[in-house]
């Protein structure tokens, strides 16, 4: 499948919103509690999801061309910290969902911060349909 280059940042933002909405539907199908773009202090992560047994994840969706960068990982880490402070929840995990190539150093940085990177494949415009076919079951990997 050929990659389609989005024409603007607003195109990327729209793709990311659609992908986050699709992710919300997938989590809800398996009875996870989902908040889409909740206000958390001064921030709005794409999703905050909670598994049926109470595990909480801050989910950020990133789409685009090229490779994922540390800024996306740092953003998730900041969202986790803010969520813990504002909502007084201690055990919050991070999930970065992206269609961009992810280099090993980025994966290492994410792991060191307790953030799971979930790669999806497909052109940026196909991103909402490119989310993993498998649904989250129980816990996401630690």
Image (cartoon, rainbow, N blue to C red):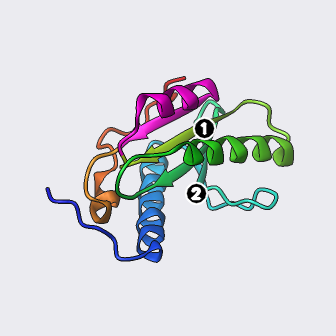
The residue carrying mark 2 is 46
The residue carrying mark 1 is 94
**Magenta residue span:** 101-119
Is 79 on the left-hand or right-hand side of 67? right
First along the sequence among labels 2 and 1: 2
Is 44 on the left-hand or right-hand side of 124? right
Residue 67 drawn above or below residue 134: below
What residue is drawn where x is 35% and y is 59%?
Answer: 128
Where residue 9 appears, as percent x and y from the top left, is 46, 72
Disc number at residue 14?
A: none
Q: Nearer the viewer, residue 19 or 78?
A: 78
As for residue 109 lying within the magenta part, the answer is yes
| Label 2 secondary element | loop
| Label 1 secondary element | strand
As for residue 68 lying within the magenta part, the answer is no
Is 130 on the left-hand or right-hand side of 92? left
Where residue 40 appears, as percent x and y from the top left, is 76, 56
């Amino acid at each position: 499948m050929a990659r389609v280059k989005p024409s603007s940042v607003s195109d990327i933002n729209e793709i990311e919103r659609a992908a986050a909405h699709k992710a919300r539907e997938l989590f809800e199908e398996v009875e996870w509690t989902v908040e889409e773009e909740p206000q958390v202090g001064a921030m709005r992560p794409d999703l905050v999801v909670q598994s049926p047994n109470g595990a909480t994840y801050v989910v950020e969706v990133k789409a685009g061309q090229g490779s994922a960068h540390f800024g996306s990982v740092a953003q998730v880490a900041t969202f986790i910290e803010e969520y813990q402070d504002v909502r007084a929840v201690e055990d919050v995990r991070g999930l970065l969902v992206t269609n961009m190539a992810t280099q090993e150093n980025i994966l290492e940085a994410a792991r060191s911060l307790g953030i799971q990177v979930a790669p999806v494949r497909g052109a940026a415009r196909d991103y909402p349909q490119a989310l993993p076919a498998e649904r989250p079951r129980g816990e996401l990997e630690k």
